[in-house]
Amino acid sequence: MALWTPDPTFYPSPRDAAAAPGERYAYVAAFDRQAARPDAIAVLDTDPASPGYGTVAGWTELPNTGDELHHFGWNACSSALCPYAPHPHVERRYLVVPGIRSSRIHILDTKDRVSPEIVKVVEAEELARRAGYSRPHTVHCGPEGLYVSALGGADGQDGPGGIAILDHESFEVLGRWEMDRGPQYLSYDFWWHINHDVLVTSEWGTPSMIENGLVGELLLGRKYGHRLHFWDLRKRRHVQEVDLGDQYQMPLELRPAHDPTRTYGFAGVVISVEDLSASVWIWFHEDGRWQARKVVDIPAEPADPADLPDLLKPFGAVPPLVTDIDLSVDDQRLYVSCWGTGELKQYDVSDPFKPVEIGSLRLGGIVRGTPHPADGGRLRGGPQMVEVSRDGRRVYVSNSLYGAWDDQFYPEGVGAWLAKIDTEPFALDERFFPHGDDFRGLRPHQVRLQGGDASSDSYCYP
Amino acid sequence: MTIATALLLGAFHGLNPAMGWLFAVARGLQERSRDKLLASLPAIAAGHLGSVAVVAVVVGVTGSLTTATALSIAGGAVLVGFGLWRLLSKRHFRWVGMRLSLPQLAGWSFLMSSAHGAGLMLIPVFTGLRPAGPGQGGEHAGHLAHAAQSVTAGLGVAALHTVGMLVVSAVVALTVYEVAGLTVLRRAWFNVDRMWAAALVAAGLFTLFQA
């Protein structure tokens, strides 16, 4: 049912969105590594005034097993206010939740309830038949409907991965987005500079390269992704690729500036095969072409091989493994997860070409295992998926990366936890630490905040 | 009466953010340039005029070939049908792309206005413009003269309508750009689509009853 006035969670500009009220709930994708029980969307109470603050308030199990929930998104967001095809009276109501292993896409209704209700399941077969893709990943609400990136091909094809378009009312798969993919083959994340008609994609690997764990030979052979791709959002054509250098393996999360007049963004690179360091890059448009430059370098930490998992023993060091980054809605702060070393870094990026580290928190980590103040025991896993509230005052981090990879880097078990950090001052909230049995044996991955967050909405007005 | 109706409907379209003033504001904000905003408005108005003029010409030409009654019935039926479709369909106008040249912007406006049924609402006005002595029988030259007359009158109405639309668009766009800011959209952007669809149906029924 259409609304009479715009959905109150839609904001014309990032400036308006930064003044949004605090979220009452956080939705968390949680999956069973054994694929024996159904995955779930866990709902956390994030209202500090509520007696249930910091606990699991809702829980919705999926109908099948083995989906491996990973990333997800909303059916509609602030881009519905964009001037060329406005439809501001739709509701931000449905979560679009892909299973990265099963290739099913679940539609969950969140309206007027704490635990969302499953209203539709798009089967893997429909995604394969209509778009030729599998392993759906990132979801963004955009001008042609819902854009969903996918890591793999269909019908036995490992690749190429790409983007499928879904109707944002019926959630049917409409087809493959790309008209001309140029040299692009590997796929992972995507987002856009919506007012410049530019789409950006990053590279991880095909299903065979990732589903049974990180493959050492492929990594040392520099076979995982190391490029960014720039596309014409209107014509759906590949425009330019930017190669970061093949030592920079796995540029994953893409965080373009929210200010629609700007044409820069940040990409996190998991690992350099030369020295195990991780890095953050800025992409920008200058002299008529897209370019990228490394702006943050995070070195590996030397370690006793006895403390390291088999995969890392030969190197005698812990790689930081920057697996997620997030840019605040006002484009002033960048948060960087170091999943290997167990650290969350806070950067002032008011000059995006010169990030300045202004904060750091230790939590978990392969060697350190830094405890959370609310619990005290050695903590496995590290800050991984990071999400920032629209006002930039709260940051949420969860600890699981991806089933098979968790087991390689944290062979004694990655655990299950989700922490909240207040940004002023930059410190852990001791009242907020759902962990262990709170997640009923499942591992938490991406967090989405009620009403939108720093990686959910695009804005058409500065 | 005809003039007032044409102007008022134009003003109504001018108020609707989806019809173009919002696009003009966005183009201005993107470049931080009021000139860019002002340059966008005539292109948007031109596209709107094109959309309305097509209906004026079709009604004018059809009117010269058929009876007043048939014209009103056909026009009314189109209006009722389109209005019901707008009322019941969930689909909305789709378009990708922010960086448009002025001719492309005019094209966008033409499509947006047409999808909205902007020109159709003027059908009752256009059908009322038929010159005396309808084209039943008579000479061939008479047909042409009638057609030319009603088309000219229709285009006049379309132009008047567009002037109303342009003036209101300009006032709203400049007010929002210079003074009010876009935050106002969050509260003031009423969903007029369903009312508009109902109005299309009502105008169609009105035309049918007049037939």
Image (spheres, coloured by chain):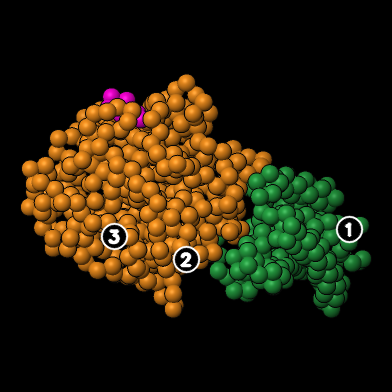
Chain colours: A orange, B green
Q: Evaluate whether label 1 is on the same chain as label 3.
A: no
Magenta-tinted stretch:
A433-440
Contact between labelled residues 3 and 2, with CB atoms less than 8 Å apart: no
Which callout, 1 or 3, points to the residue nearer the camera?
Answer: 3
Q: Is residue A99 left or right of residue A11?
A: left
Q: Which of A306 and A433 is in front in this view?
A: A306
Q: Mark 1 points at which residue?
A: B4
Q: Which mark is residue A263?
A: 2
What separation in Å lies between label 1 and label 3 (alpha carbons)? 68 Å
Pinpoint residue A396: horizontal percent, then vertical percent: 39, 39
Q: Is mark 1 on a helix, strand or loop?
A: helix
Q: How crowded is mark 1: few (under 14 residues within 10 Å), some or many (20 or more)?
A: few
Q: Can residue A445 be seen in this view?
A: no
Can you tell which quarter of the image residue A198 is in? bottom left
Report if residue A437 lies within the magenta region.
yes
Which callout, 2 or 3, points to the residue nearer the camera?
Answer: 3
Residue found at x 17% / y 63%: A274
Pinpoint residue A231: horizontal percent, then vertical percent: 40, 67
Q: Can residue A201 be seen in this view?
A: yes
Question: Which of marks 3 and 2 precedes in the sequence?
Answer: 2
Q: Which mark is residue A314?
A: none
Contact between labelled residues 3 and 1, with CB atoms less than 8 Å apart: no
Residue found at x 22% / y 32%: A378
Q: Name the residue under label 3.
A: A297
Residue found at x 25% / y 37%: A370
Report if residue B92 lies within the magenta region.
no
